[in-house]
Every structure is written in structure tokens, then in C-alpha cells.
Image: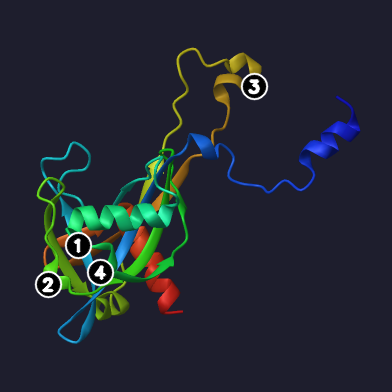
Amino acid sequence: MNLTDIIAKLNGRKPTILGYDNFHKHAILLPLIEKNNEVHILFEVRSMKLRSQPGDICFPGGKIDPTDPDPEYCAIRETTEELGISKTSIENISPLDYIVADNGRMIFPFTGTIKNAEQINPSQAEVGEIFTVPLSYFLQVKPEIYKVYFKVIPADDFPFDLIVGGEDYNWQVRHKDELFYQYNGKVIWGLTARILYHFLHLIDS
């Protein structure tokens, strides 16, 4: 392969995230409803029957299926399935910033309004309960922030002889901030809290 061939292959290429095809992709919806003449954010409590993260608080959403034409479609589909509502009940959909998580997942968040919220009939297989929190509460309260540190543990067969410093190599210890919101005995944390914080920053900046 010569230089002309290389340039021709790369010319006009649009960059993406390295390893994009290997990520597990999910989409979620941050639902807004009107309740008592006030805007509320709706949350789900995951059913205790679920194998993954039972009892955690989350937004409606799930894995993007091969048949989903795009992440927004997935977010709407999952929301209708989990809340037992029709697609026409979801309006004013807007994308939020997507997240590349440390565990090999990409999350595509959206926000949208749900009309006729009194018709919500959650799926008993996936949702333990739903609850809402006034938006005004989150605009007034700052999250608690705690650090989580990551330790580097090389495998037993790691080739230390191939790197400068060998077994004394100075690995950089990373950390991330975990956000916690508390409301009436409910604890919102993890990716749900990160997405919520991002949304609040967008509308309050």
C-alpha cells in the first residue's frame, strides 16, 4: 500500500468513538410531567425480580435492539413498555449528551414530556414502583458528592518485562465522582444521578 492509497482511504472520514461497535448501547428517557400545576420528574424503582440492579432508582430505558432505527426510537419504545403508555403520550423529545461508561456501555439519554400521566400503568415485570419529584426541589438542592477510586491490578501473566519500570511501574490511580440526591427516603445515584445533574445544568445555566 502506497501513500496515495492511504490518503484515499482516510479522505473525508468522519471520526467516531474508538471501539464504538464493541460498546453495549442503551437509551433512556428522562420523563417530565405536570402535577399539581408544577413540573415533576418521574423515576422508576426497578423490580426486585430483575437480575440486574434490582431495587435501584432509574429512568425508563434499556438496551438498543438491532431493530431500533436509532437511540431515540429505543428510548420511546422502552418507556412505553415500562410505563404502559402509548407513543403518542410522549412529546417534546430532546437529546441530552450521551455517556461513555467505564463498563463498556454507551448511554443515549433523552428528555420528553408525558401527557395524561394518570394513565401510566407500569410493567410489573420490570417496575417495582414509580414516583415523582418536583423539578423545583432539584433546582434548589445540590447533590452530595463522593469519590470512587479505581485500583490497577495487572493479570498474573502481565508482561512487566516489556514496560519501563517493570513491576514498579507507576500506574495512575483514577477516580470518579458519584452523585447522590435524596428525597423522601429515595436515593438517586449512579448514572441516573449523572444524567439528572446534566439535565439540570442545561436548563439552569
Q: In the drawing, what numbered circle is on residue 163?
A: 3
Q: Nearer the viewer, mark 3 or mark 1?
A: 1
Residue assigned mark 2: 118
Task: Name the spot of residue 50 as percent of width and height, x first.
Answer: 16, 40
Q: Read off the residue under disc 1.
A: 85
Q: CA distance from mark 2 to mark 1?
A: 10 Å
Q: Earlier in the sequence, mark 3 or mark 2?
A: 2
Q: Nearer the viewer, residue 152 or 129?
A: 129
Vertical placement of residue 33 versus 188, above or below: below
| Residue denoted by label 4 | 89
Task: Give the CA distance from mark 4 to mark 1.
Answer: 7 Å
Point out residue 119 in the picture as x, y percentages from the top left corner: 12, 68
Residues at discs 3 and 2 in contact (Cβ within 8 Å): no
**Is 162 situated above or below 99?**
above
The reply to whether the C-beta atoms of the residues labelled 2 and 1 are less than 8 Å apart is: no
Measured as percent of width and height from the top left, residue 6 is found at 83, 33
* Residue reaching furthest to the bottom: 37
Q: Left or right: where does residue 133 sit relative to residue 94? A: left
**Label 4 sits on what residue type?**
Ser
Mark 3 and mark 4 lie on one chain; the one further toward the N terminus is 4
Q: CA distance from mark 3 to mark 1?
A: 56 Å
Question: Around disc 3, counting alpha carbons within 10 Å, would you say few (fewer than 14), some (14 to 19), or many (20 or more)?
Answer: few
Residue found 24% across the figure and 59% down from its top: 188
Relative depth, front residue between 48 and 141: 48
Sequence-earlier tag: 3 or 1:
1
N-terminal of the two: label 4 or label 2? 4
Q: Are marks 4 and 1 in contact (CB under 8 Å)?
A: yes
